[in-house]
Amino acid sequence: MKIYTSAQMKQIEANANEKGYAYIDMMYSAGVACANLTEKAYLTMNEKVAVICGKGKNGGDGFVAAEYLRSKGYNVSVILACGKPVADDAVTMYRRMNGISVTDWLTEKEKSSEIIRKADVIIDSVFGFGFKGKADDSTAEIFAAVNSSKAKVVAIDLPSGAECDTGAVNGECIKADLTLAISCRKPAHVLKPACSFCGKVKTVDIGLDESAVQEEFFVLPKSFKPNFERRNPLSNKGDYGKVLSVCGSKKYPGAAFFAASGAVRIGAGLVTCAFPVDAYSAIAPKLNEPIMMPLPCCEDGFLARGALDLLIPAAEISDCMLVGCGLGNTLGTSSVVEELLKSTTCPTVIDADGINIISANINMLEAVRGRAIITPHPGEMARLLRLSVEQVESNRILLTKAVAKQFGIVVVLKGANTVVSDGEQVYVNRTGNAGMARGGSGDLLAGIIAGLVAQGYSAMQSAMLGTYIHGACGDVAAKTLSEAGMTPTDMIKILPRLLSDYE
């Protein structure tokens, strides 16, 4: 599915303008197309239409839609949300309207409110893809009036109040029943929370050529299903990869279980579960398939540096190493993780405490350039980059791509709409739900990704497929058990049944 940012859309429009497709003609095409789709979706001749317009180009689309619907005989009113238009083409379209009642929210609030209350259909054309921040108090008030009305709401391009590139909603935002994405979908159409304000999203083709702009942001369609080849009947466990899972501790034994189970259930041929010896009694009885590798540890049950004598040789004969889930962040584990990253060459998935350890010196990532996947949640990403969680959450795509590019790795920033990037492309995952927000879920994801890497998938493929499948398991668990009651253990049981649909 094509997704373009605001900067890319500006470039696409500029390219079209240079080739003779004037901006004002683009505005006219967009307005007419949106009017036709609104008519098809919701209108009958006796219904009242209120078109709420801003001062910029998005408002110009609304003026075109209003005039077009009026010309077809509909009862149309226009409300200026922020005063008269200022963008040149929008001013032209405003002046072209003929015989349409126009009220100004700023000076005729009571009359405007009455129009909104009586409307059967409302077209939102206040803000477009250039909007950032939050609407001022007056504009927020008109958004609230629209949201409290009984009308069907159609948003042109984006619901006003949502940021295009981040999907952020920082204040009042129009809640649409239908959003008409001009030319292509934007990040806000798939990123939370903005996507929850879009309703149904339909793309409106106005004849723009997108071929000159490289597509860097994408999502998989909801109908997507991974396609795994059926296994060769003559194959053996060595054909499906070896995973070394260095996870868990006496304090966090569950992390070792979830990580190893993820690798096993996704199909890795041989999984070695390496953990502090003091955690053996808590971990080993839960795992039948993996090889157990108890390691030297300190009195507190966390890894000691002596573990490296066993780990480094094991890593060298592994197809993927997973490091970090439930290890703890002690002097011993820090020493082990740092030396492992420096002294091994196999592809490596770094999660949880592995990322926290790297946060003390982010340049440790140079040691795994070209062979690593890191899977931070927003808190871990914040520690890694010396930022607040709020800063991370407001720049998920930009930061994920930037870190991946800087260190030549794949980054999986977990959370609502997990973001995956290799520094060039960005994938946003749409599977998953709030029921997965609990301990063990991230460990399971890390194990799934490591198992895919071991089977020969590239780092980016493994991260994408892993997040998709992990989220899909969560969706099945939520549907059958409830978001409140589901657990990562339930997801482990669901995973092999889900994979049967993909073979």
Image (tube, rainbow, N blue to C red):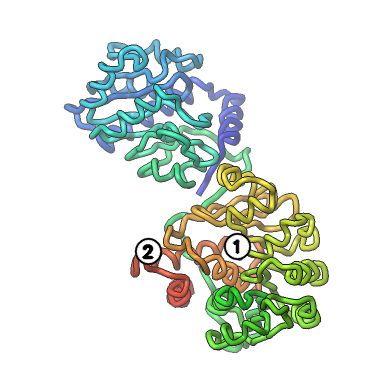
Describe the element under mark 2 as helix, strand or loop: loop
Between marks 2 and 1 in the image, the one whose residue lies nearer the viewer: 2
| Residue 362 position within the rendered picture, expressed as x and y whole percent measured from the top left | 75, 55
Outermost front residue = 299
Task: Write down the quadrant of residue 351 in the picture.
Answer: bottom right
Can residue 71 be seen at all in this image of the molecule?
no
- Tell me: residue 495, above or below residue 291: above
Few, some or many residues within 10 Å of mark 2 (<14, 14–19, 20+): few
The three-letter amino acid code for the residue at tag 1 is Ala
| Residue 296 position within the rendered picture, expressed as x and y whole percent measured from the top left | 74, 82
Lower sequence index among marks 2 and 1: 1
Q: Is residue 486 left or right of residue 6?
A: left
Outermost left residue = 46
- Tell me: residue 370, above or below residue 424: below
Q: Residue at x 72, y 56 (%)?
A: 359
Outermost right residue = 343
- Tell me: residue 309, above or below residue 55: below
Few, some or many residues within 10 Å of mark 1 (<14, 14–19, 20+): many
Q: For mark 2, what is the residue?
A: 484
Q: Residue at x 48, y 16 (%)?
A: 89
Q: Residue at x 58, y 77 (%)?
A: 253
Task: Write down the quadrant of residue 143 in the picture.
Answer: top left
| Residue 387 position within the rendered picture, expressed as x and y whole percent measured from the top left | 65, 46
| Residue 444 position within the rendered picture, expressed as x and y whole percent measured from the top left | 54, 70
Q: For mark 1, what is the residue?
A: 463
The three-letter amino acid code for the residue at tag 2 is Ala
- Tell me: residue 80, above or below residue 248: above
Q: Which residue is drawn at 47% across and 64% down?
A: 225
